[in-house]
Amino acid sequence: MLQVVTRIGDVPWRLPFGGWLGESTKPDDVAFGPDGRYLFRNGLDLLCLSPAGRKLWSYRLPSIPSCATALDGSGDFLFGLRDGRIVAITPYGERAKDFAASRRGAITAVGAYGDGGIAGYSDGRLALLGTGASIAVNVMEKMPASPEAFAGVPGRLAIVDAHGGLALYDGNGKRRWLVDSGMTGSNAFLASDRIILTGLGRAASFSLDGTLLRAATITNAAAPALLAPSGLLFSAGDDWILGAYRFEGPLTIVSPPAPPACPADPNAIDTLGFGDMEGADEERQLSIIADIEKSLDSATIGRWEAGDRAVLEKIASGTASVLDEGAARRRFHLFSRPRIEACRTLGEIGSPASIGTLAEVALSGGDPAVRASALEAIGAIGLDPDAGAETALAMAGAGMRLDDEVAFALVDAIESLVFGSGLPPSAGALRSLFALAGPTYPNAVGTRARAALARFARGHVVD
């Protein structure tokens, strides 16, 4: 059973893995895509879920991986395989790049570097992975032992090897220094002024010249500790209790530029065979949405996802309908059903790339049921990398009085976004809640808004 837990302990959704895991009790590996999607691996088999927990696609690798999954600089999932190949799979479940097998030994780690990636081998050598399935070898000084973890940006790269060696490389591939970290099986994090390593029951931080700054030991740890930008270490114990430990002050984690968040493909409207969307009647639009839902239910949306989202965004925004002069007088409720269904399906797919369209729908002056559905979809996505949802939620509560249906959906969306993203509510979102809690709205709406404010206070998410 996969269970997603928010920062205050809520469980927004659960998903039984069923027969996908076979006799295993948990997946072998998990990775996160550029838009928050989950990728699970069990042996050769991959399963991708949306941030909302819907199955998007599955894929079978040609060989068992020999190291953990990572993202490259373009947002593809990288797999170092036991047969020596490196395979890149797109967020839509298609093989994007296939790097030829190497005779340099087993692949022990892969990671992002620039627009491409980097791989480490059991003999300590490093290989840069280009965007065109090319490999540049021996351009960087090799590590004394097999690399285990990478952290860096162009011009600065930290590498940890299997013997605990920690090295910092510059943009020319030259190793600036090498020290014994005393840690193996570590995760590496690069901050603006230090390098932090975390492992099973241990953590250490080093300056950018290799000097040990501090170290910590955590007793009864059941899994490697993870570092938060707040400087806290999170470690699961043998007693099933998750502990948080103050290790550093607030950190500025240096990360590679975020890869594109899987945008919708408007050109796919024609190539997917949906024909002329302009002027499509209500039943035709509902039929299109039903076909997309079938592919989502069967976890086969995969390579069609970008096009399907473009179609859904077009329907949700109302631009798939052509109104004559007579119909314009009925605009308030015209084509509400497909627009509501399109918003709901976009929320189930769960891509933050759809937030812009959903925000426009939520701020429109149209049918309250459509606006409420758009807000519910924003809440279902639960992520806001470009602050588009935050702005929309603040603006939605700042204008004229909302219909009760929209008001309830606005409160739900603010809560879902706050607890899903782990970020405090914005000042604008709080103003919206205070407005909804005021005398302008019915008691039921006010009670709901006040309950959300109380939850934020108890969850310590208000700055």
Image (cartoon, rainbow, N blue to C red):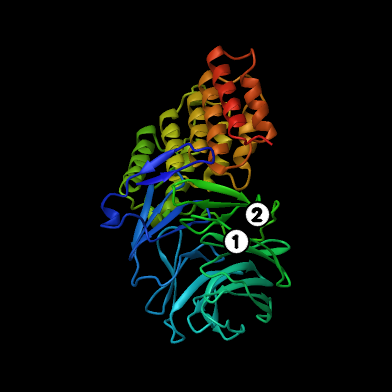
Residue at the spot 41% in from the left edge and 40% down from the top edge: 13
Which picture quadrant has residue 24?
A: bottom left
Mark 1 and mark 2: Cα distance apart in space: 8 Å
Q: Secondary structure at mark 1?
A: strand
Please say whether residue 274 is visible from this viewpoint. Answer: no
**What mark, if any, has residue 247 been given in the picture?**
2
Please say whether residue 71 is visible from this viewpoint. Answer: yes
Q: Secondary structure at mark 2?
A: loop
Q: Position of residue 458 (x, y in %)?
A: 59, 30
Q: Position of residue 83 (x, y in %)?
A: 37, 79
Q: Is residue 331 left or right of residue 271?
A: right
Amino acid of disc 1: Ala
**What mark, if any, has residue 103 been given in the picture?**
none
Residue at the spot 57% in from the left edge and 29% down from the top edge: 455
Amino acid of disc 2: Phe
Q: Position of residue 53 (x, y in %)?
A: 41, 45
Residue at the spot 50% in from the left edge and 21% down from the top edge: 405
Closer to us: 419 or 381 = 419
Relative to 180, residue 51 above or below? above
Dot 1: within a 10 Å radius of its alpha carbon, few (fewer than 14), some, or many (20 or more) residues?
many
Q: Position of residue 319 (x, y in %)?
A: 51, 38
Closer to us: 447 or 135 = 447
Which picture quadrant has residue 400?
A: top right
Cβ atoms at labels 1 and 2 below 8 Å apart: yes
Q: Earlier in the sequence, mark 1 or mark 2?
A: 1
Closer to us: 398 or 136 = 136
Q: Mark 1 highlights which residue?
A: 203
Dot 2: within a 10 Å radius of its alpha carbon, few (fewer than 14), some, or many (20 or more) residues?
some
